[in-house]
Image: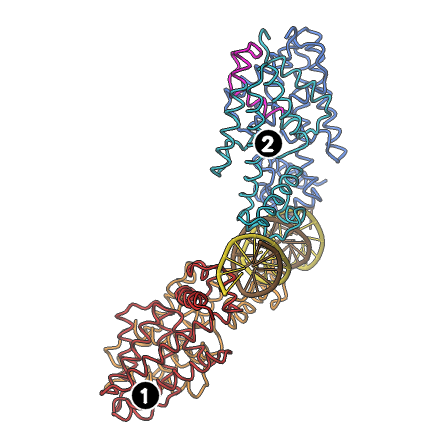
Chain colours: A red, B orange, C blue, D cyan, E brown, F yellow
Amino acid sequence: MRADARDNRARIMTAADDVFGRSPSASTDDVARLAGVGIATVFRHFPTKTELLEAVLTLRLERLRERARELSGDAEPGKAFFEFFTQVVSESASKLAIAEALTAAGAVAGAEAQEAGRGMRSAFNDLLTAAQRAGAVRTDAEFPEVYALLIGASRGATAAKLDPAVRDRMLTLIYAGLKPYA
Amino acid sequence: MRADARDNRARIMTAADDVFGRSPSASTDDVARLAGVGIATVFRHFPTKTELLEAVLTLRLERLRERARELSGDAEPGKAFFEFFTQVVSESASKLAIAEALTAAGAVAGAEAQEAGRGMRSAFNDLLTAAQRAGAVRTDAEFPEVYALLIGASRGATAAKLDPAVRDRMLTLIYAGLKPYA
Amino acid sequence: MRADARDNRARIMTAADDVFGRSPSASTDDVARLAGVGIATVFRHFPTKTELLEAVLTLRLERLRERARELSGDAEPGKAFFEFFTQVVSESASKLAIAEALTAAGAVAGAEAQEAGRGMRSAFNDLLTAAQRAGAVRTDAEFPEVYALLIGASRGATAAKLDPAVRDRMLTLIYAGLKPYA
Amino acid sequence: MRADARDNRARIMTAADDVFGRSPSASTDDVARLAGVGIATVFRHFPTKTELLEAVLTLRLERLRERARELSGDAEPGKAFFEFFTQVVSESASKLAIAEALTAAGAVAGAEAQEAGRGMRSAFNDLLTAAQRAGAVRTDAEFPEVYALLIGASRGATAAKLDPAVRDRMLTLIYAGLKPYA
DNA sequence: TATGAATGAGGGTTCATTCAT
DNA sequence: AATGAATGAACCCTCATTCAT
């Protein structure tokens, strides 16, 4: 791939992340305009709008996976787990795409997106397990329901455009339910 | 209103609830086709697609309000509160429209929908307060964050098409956080 | 025809004259609403929108014919002719239907409308001939071009929403051309 | 602008001029079909039907302005004035769009169309003034009413689909009124 | 007879995708 | 490889006309 092509691809991804983060029903033209390229260029890189959306989701998932991995070496696994959870939900409030990405993580068609979803969930599972081992999260909580909670809290924050203070109190309630002896 | 018109209106509402319950971006044609009427008939009853959507949401909200009110006289307020919560989330899993209704409850333009939203939230607040008085829900949990939890759990269940067992375990975690001394 | 039916017919005609006088592209619903009847009643009386329009034109033409006939007995034929001309153009400025009627007078399909058109033109021709005999209008001006002038002045006044003062000065120019030795 | 785009734009304009010249209520589809392009292409060049109509009017007005300017250097200002007047009215008989353009010249929203309208009226005014200075047109006739006459004669000729001979005799009457000592 | 309801064809407009430069 | 232009299917909505009450 030529250098200018790689550049364009990156700019399209950035633009798409921004545009779809604001409004998932945005048009491909919007993306092209923000990226400063012609619309045909977008379709050259992503033959289908769906593929473009999947690429955005994949990027999001990979970033979340990275963050989870960074935190997984933390000395305080409980703090690491809750910090990750909080960050995801907080960002979801302003980035529709994150909540979409979390949801679609399992249902998406493309191979790359699936792999990214698996990786992200795996990293999140590591955080959870470590926190449980450290006694910071009750051990009878299994991964599927905790992940469902993460999705729910994210989508709830996104959809309702939640007041940050309310969002934090909601997280406090969730964390109370996740902690041992609760 | 004439009998046949009332019939058609009801059929359109039912069809719209079904169609938008599956996909909120469905077309008005889809609704008309499922209802078995011409598209102009839909527009005669609901001059705008927005008004049709709002009517569906309003109906949903009114049903939820009814259910909440029925439960509000229950002898065991704690049980009543959690039962309502569970029912809402369970149904949301198969009916997008419910989650949409919960979210839109405050943001919707139409007067009727707004009133229905207020009524539903008020009835849910009554359930919450009674449960708190009965010692079944911690008293430092205030309405906004509990409602946010309800929305989040509903949207999460909807979006992820959650396995029912997982959904129940997720609710268990949420309830653990809502109960006193948790 | 029953008495109530005759009443309704008259009310529909009045409403149509008003509505189409303002906007020739108005809908049949507008007419029905202003007339205070159901839309089906309009179509019972006038099976086609075209027929309704023709009825309105016919009425207009008949009124113009009446006015021309009233003036045809006037002691001063010249004054009568110019008065009629001025009245028609003045009213056209606020009633689109008049200009339409004049234009359509010859091109309309319905038998009644054709008859009304012939009657109106005939009465106008009488006014013209009398004025010419009285020496108030040049005798080499024949009916077709004088009628064309009437149509033109009417449509011009209508279309341009002419300032009344300008409209009068325009008529002065036209009359200067119509008078003998001019 | 690319060559093919410029070609298509020209073909759309030509088609629109033709179609709207026959019937101002024609559909955008009609224009596209006659132009031999897809309907979306029409909307790409003219985002709104109104803008397309205005473009057609603007073109007409500019052509009239050009013709007026060409004639304004004529050695016989009187002949030039009447020739322009006659040409406009003659063409209007077969091109609705010209009469529409004349009428809309002052009432149109778009900046270009307004400018074209001003330019055309200004050029016509020059012709008039020169003709008056040369003693070919009475000096007490001011621009507004002469312009109103032009509009009226055009619309009259258009609407009535006037026989050319009658049209010419109508113009003779009008010119008689415009000449001095009349 | 009068009415409101129902209808389908059509209108303007948008958008994902393909084509030509 | 990059671009702007072209496309047709689909969407929301309106209206003259027909049907059922």
Q: Estimate how packed mark 2 is, as few (under 14), some (14 to 19) or many (20 or more) residues with alpha carbons within 10 Å.
A: many
Query: Dividing the image into 4 quarters, which one contains the C terminus of chain D?
Result: top right
Q: Specify start and end residues of the magenta stretch as a single range.
A: D128-153
The local secondary structure at tag 1 comes to helix
Q: Is residue B105 visible?
A: yes
Residue, disc 1:
A128
| Count of numbered labels shown in the rendering | 2
Which quadrant of the figure has residue D23?
top right
- Say above or below: A157 vs C155: below
Query: Most prominent secondary structure in the magenta stretch?
Result: helix
Residue C154 placed where, x, y %?
61, 25
Residue B31 placed where, x, y %?
57, 66
Q: Per the image, is C175 magenta?
A: no
Residue A130 placed where, x, y %?
29, 90
- Say above or below: F16 vs B83: above
Question: Which subunit holds the residue at mark 2?
Answer: C
Q: Per the image, is D136 magenta?
A: yes
Give the mark toward the camera: 2 or 1: 1
Q: Using residue A75 as the reference point, say whether residue C101 is left or right of it.
A: right
Q: Mark on residue C96?
A: 2
Q: Mark on residue B98?
A: none
Viewer-nearest residue: E6 or E9:
E9
Q: Is residue B136 visible?
A: no
Which quadrant of the figure has residue A33?
bottom left
User: Please, what is the three-letter code of the amino acid marked with disc 2?
Assistant: Leu
